[in-house]
Amino acid sequence: MISAERTQAIIDAIGESAGQDYILDPEGHQALYRESLPALAAVLGRSSVQVHAKEYATYDTQAGEAQTEYKKYARRARNFTFFTAIVSALLVMIPGVFELFDISKDVREVISPKLVIGLSLLGVVGAGLASIALGQIRSRKLLMGWMERRSKAEELRLLYFDAVTDLEGVAADATEAVLMRLEYFRRYLLEEQKNYYTIRSQQLEKRADMLLGIVAWTTGLVAIINGSISVLSGGGNSTGWTSLAGLALIVQAYSSMRNQQELSEQNQRNAARYEGTRSILARLYGRLDAVREAIANGKHELLPEFVAAVQEPLSNENRQWLKEMDRKNSAIGKLEAELEKVQGE
């Protein structure tokens, strides 16, 4: 058993979660705690601990690079598909715009063919670039590479803390050493992940609200444009006014692009899932004082039990992350279908 004063001293020595605690840095932490908590520093210096940190760093870097590549080409595919839709709408609008502005027949005969050819070429280029971007995602398996590497990195994060909190060979009277491991786990995994899921769920919710808000507003704008055209044309079939329905097609294409983005990113769904994980971690954090007191009184076996309880929702989140691959692949398929639709118009 150790005193409350000594327990608090260990808590203070470990400190609270800071901005860069998600980085697994056993060598840096070993230097940080070498004087104040030498028993913990010795644990962090073990090869069984450091190997997981090094593997994590490798996969974390690869995951970051794959994520950047995937998002770059996904963004290009969306933007070029939208560009192609704009060009297609402008082609539809040409005859009506000439009539609306009372362009003379002679001028039309000179300008119209050139506009059609120019816009058609732009449409071909836009569709081609969108196809190239989608081909990059498919052929290089960028989505799979990102998600699988991120999953592996998070698996290694948990293995790292398994190694730090492993009590094999720890003497029955080494209560301080066990408590140090608990507090290290508390700062660098429990608090860090609780903070991450709190912030990230809020960010995703805001992003989902923004994208879905754009979809709602643009859907309404399409109705306004079509209704206005109907009024201005007097309910007739005047080519001049009805051709402006191409504007509605452009707005609709933009709405579709943002909807596809939400389908791909799954912000709303992930925000709800992350909030669930945050809630579980917050409840477990509420039990920390009781676990800490029990360990201080010699019940060392509670450390691996507490570690397992905290890691379970994180492992489950990792499994759910991999399942998102099917939804993201489905979103890519819908984007390809949208491109084919635009090309056929």
Image (cartoon, helix red, strand yellow):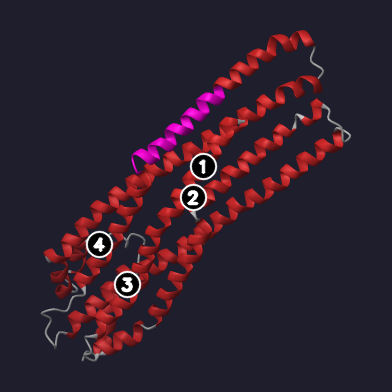
Q: Dots 1 and 2: beta carbons under 8 Å?
A: yes
State the count of labels.
4
Q: Which mark is residue 311?
A: 3
1 or 2: mark nearer the eye = 1
Q: Which mark is residue 156?
A: 4
Query: Alpha-carbon distance for marks 2 and 4?
Result: 26 Å
Queried whether the magenta region covers residue 22, the answer comes back as no
Asked whether residue 45 is in view, the answer is no
- In percent of width and height, residue 272 lies at 51, 65
Q: Which mark is residue 335?
A: 1
Q: Which mark is residue 278?
A: none
**Could you tell me what secondary structure mostly forms the magenta stretch?**
helix
Q: What residue is shown with label 2?
A: 264
**In the visual, does 4 lie left or right of 50?**
right
Query: Alpha-carbon distance for marks 4 and 1?
Result: 34 Å
User: Residue 74's image quarter?
Assistant: top left
Q: Please tell me whether mark 4 sits on a helix, a strand or a loop.
A: helix
Query: Alpha-carbon distance for marks 3 and 4?
Result: 12 Å
Q: Dots 3 and 1: beta carbons under 8 Å?
A: no
Q: Dots 2 and 3: beta carbons under 8 Å?
A: no
Queried whether the magenta region covers residue 138, the answer comes back as yes
> Foreground: 61 or 177?
61
- In percent of width and height, residue 278 lies at 44, 70
Q: Residues within 10 Å of mark 1 (few under 14, many from 20)?
A: many
Q: In what quadrant of the picture does the C terminus appear?
A: top right
Q: Dots 2 and 4: beta carbons under 8 Å?
A: no
Q: Earlier in the sequence, mark 2 or mark 3?
A: 2
